[in-house]
Image (cartoon, grey):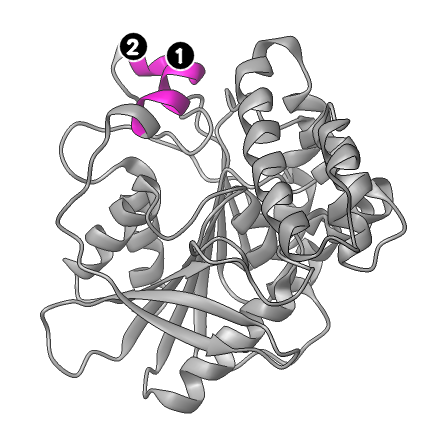
Amino acid sequence: MPLLQSNYTPTFLFKNGHVSTIFPNVFRKIKDVTQKRERIELHDGDFIDIDWSYTISKNVKKVAIIVHGLEGNAQRQYILGTARHLNHNNWDVIAVNLRNCSGEVNRLYRSYNAGVSEDIDQIINHVISKYSYTNISLCGFSLGGNIILKYLGEDRQLATQIKAATAISAPCDLYDSLLAINKTKNIIYEKRFIRHLKEKLLERQNVFPDKITVEEITTCKSLMDIDNLYTSKAHGYKDAIDYYTKCSSLQFLKNIKVPTLVLNAKNDSFLGDQCYPIDEAKKNDHLFLEIPDYGGHVGFYLPGKAYYNEQRTLDFFEKQGG
């Protein structure tokens, strides 16, 4: 599918990628979304928590499943903003808390990573078995976008209820994204990620002292160190490179058969060149790629309630049978 022309043109201040990235995290406050938590018991004995929000319409047959990014949760402002916009337009919403992201340490040593498509599959199967939605659409942000794209392109039989998907600021090539984050201009973001991840690991060490030591955690100086120490090993990969290689969604895009929109800003400093799947989009009629000049990483600010990515997600879902 040819690349989509983007009409996202923010005001001057938000043409700066760092402003677009930081502003929503610091200044956006969404308080009018009411969420109700449901716990799903997983096949391996662990659990995952999902947070529902509902439209006021009755007997709705449409539900969107939204997946957050690295060290996020279902209460991030970008999740709540998307949920609110969809709720106001006759969609129920499930905001996923990936394992160990709902405020409670999970039962197993493993947690989440950029390729945990099996957890998404279990959530979807749970929704199909328990509820009567005829349209299930998916939206993933950053790491969550990679998970959604990987899920759709893997060798599995997808439920007929899955009608569309959007991936916002998706690091389609995980190693290329890591190299981008490692650049000096991103040092503030990188240090923040490292600090939060190490705090989470120390929580896990307290529960699983035989699996990992405090010394091993404190000596980690980079995201790759953490992925070599924990992420890869806890999830069955040889090392960080093996994890990045096998979990990057780029290799799965050619197999996607559900209408899918990838929205990656050109000035997203978290994404390297390989995270813009231009060739893959040109060769796959089901894959739509929009590369606005602006937007930063999960930014896309617009004045008013709904951001550009929220509007595009709703529009895309509706056009695909919503």
Query: Is 304 placed left or right of 91 in the picture?
Result: left
Apparent side of residue 224 relative to residue 19 in the rendered image (left or right): right
Residue at left offset 53%, top offset 56%: 100
Picture coordinates of residue 261 (x, y %)?
A: 48, 50
Magenta residues, start to end: 13-24
The quarter in which the C terminus is drawn is bottom left
Q: Position of residue 72 (x, y in %)?
A: 46, 44
Position of 266 relative to 305 (above/below): above
* Amino acid type assigned to the residue bearing label 2 in the image: Leu
Q: Residue at x 61, y 39 (%)?
A: 171
Find numbered disc 2 in the image and state the secondary structure of the residue it sits on.
helix
Q: Magenta region, mostly helix, strand or loop?
A: helix
Q: According to the image, label 1 marks what residue? A: 16
Asked which quadrant contains residue 22, the reply is top left
Q: CA distance from mark 2 to mark 1?
A: 6 Å
Asked whether residue 1 appears in the rendered view, the answer is: no
Q: Residue at x 34, y 48 (%)?
A: 79
18 part of magenta stretch:
yes
Mark 1 residue element: loop
Q: Which mark is residue 13?
A: 2
Tally the marks: 2
Asked if the magenta segment contains residue 1, the reply would be no
Q: Is residue 271 left or right of residue 71?
A: right
Res 131 visible: yes
Within 10 Å of disc 2 (Cα), the crowding (few <14, some 14-19, many 20+) is few
Residue 303 location, quadrant: top left
* Side (left or right) of 253 relative to 303: right
Give, as a three-letter code, the residue at label 1: Asn
